Amino acid sequence: MNALPPNSTDEGRAALIEALGSRSIVFVGLMGAGKTAIGRKVAAMLSLPFMDSDQEIESVSRMTVPELFERYGEPEFRALEQRVILRLLENGPQVLSTGGGAFMNAQTREAVAAYGVSVWLEADLDLLMERVSKKQNRPLLKNPDPRGVLERLMGERYPVYATADLTVPTRDDRKEIIAGEVVAALCAHLGVDTIATGATSATTDGVQS
C-alpha cells in the first residue's frame, strides 16, 4: 500500500499545530544529544516559539548553570529547574528543550505528559563524548573520567528517557535532517500526514548542543 503523499508545508504545519493544540513539543535526552540545536530547527519548521529551560533558569537566577551547581548543589538546582519547566509548560504550543536531568524528576514527567509531547533524542556514547568534550560548561562532567560519568548517566537515564512519547535517534548528520525526522515522528504520533520539510540527507553539519 502506497504511503500518502506529503502535505504541502503550510497545510501540514497547520494540521500538526491543530493536532498539537496547547501542548508543547518537549525535547529530552542527555547533554550533547542536540536538544537545543534540533529544537530550534523544529520550531523554525513549524513556526513555533522556542524555549530552552537552561537558558530560562540562567535568566531568572542571573547565574549560569555551572555557577548554580557550584553554589547551591544539584538538589537545589533540580528544584529550580522543575519550577521553571512547570511554568514554561503553561505557554504552549511551543518547542521546549530541557536539561539532561529534568526528565528524571517524576513531577516534571507528569507535567510534560499532561501539557506536552515528549521527544527523546537518543544518541550513542561516542557521539555524546565527541560533542561534550568541546564544551567546558557541563557540571556533571567535571570529573577525571567523563566517559565513565556519561556511561553511568546513560545507564540511569536511558530507561526513563525511553518512556517519552517519541524516540528519535540522532547522529552526526545535518540538523535539518534530524529535525525533519522529528517532525515526521510527530506527524505519525498525532495522526497527521507527513509534512514536506524539504530536508534530505547530505553532508554533515554537526549538531552541538
Image (tube, rainbow, N blue to C red):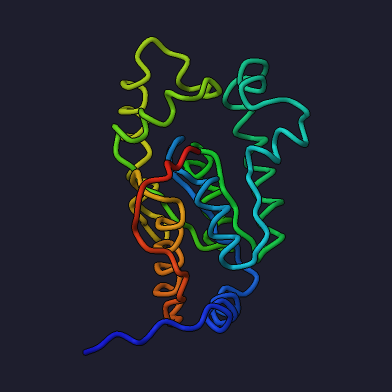
Give 201 or 59, whichever is nearer the viewer: 201
Q: Which residue is painted at 76% across and 30% down in the image?
A: 61
The N terminus lies in which quarter of the figure? Answer: bottom left
**Residue 148 found in image quarter:** top left
**Residue 94 in the image: x percent, y percent?**
64, 61
**Residue 44 found in image quarter:** bottom right
Give 106 or 204, whichever is nearer the viewer: 204
Give 24 or 34, whichever is nearer the viewer: 34
**Residue 170 in the image: x percent, y percent?**
36, 49
Q: Which residue is painted at 47% across and 83% down in the image?
A: 7
**Residue 27 in the image: x percent, y percent?**
50, 52
Q: Which residue is painted at 54% across and 76% down in the image?
A: 16
Q: How many labels does the image show?
A: 0
Q: Which residue lies furthest to the bottom in this view?
A: 1
- Residue 91 appears left or right of 16: right
**Residue 193 in the image: x percent, y percent?**
43, 82
Q: Which residue is painted at 36% across and 56% down in the image?
A: 168
**Residue 67 found in image quarter:** top right
Q: Residue furthest top?
A: 144
Q: Residue furthest front?
A: 203
- Where 101 sits versus 108, above or below? above
- Where 1 sits versus 147, above or below? below
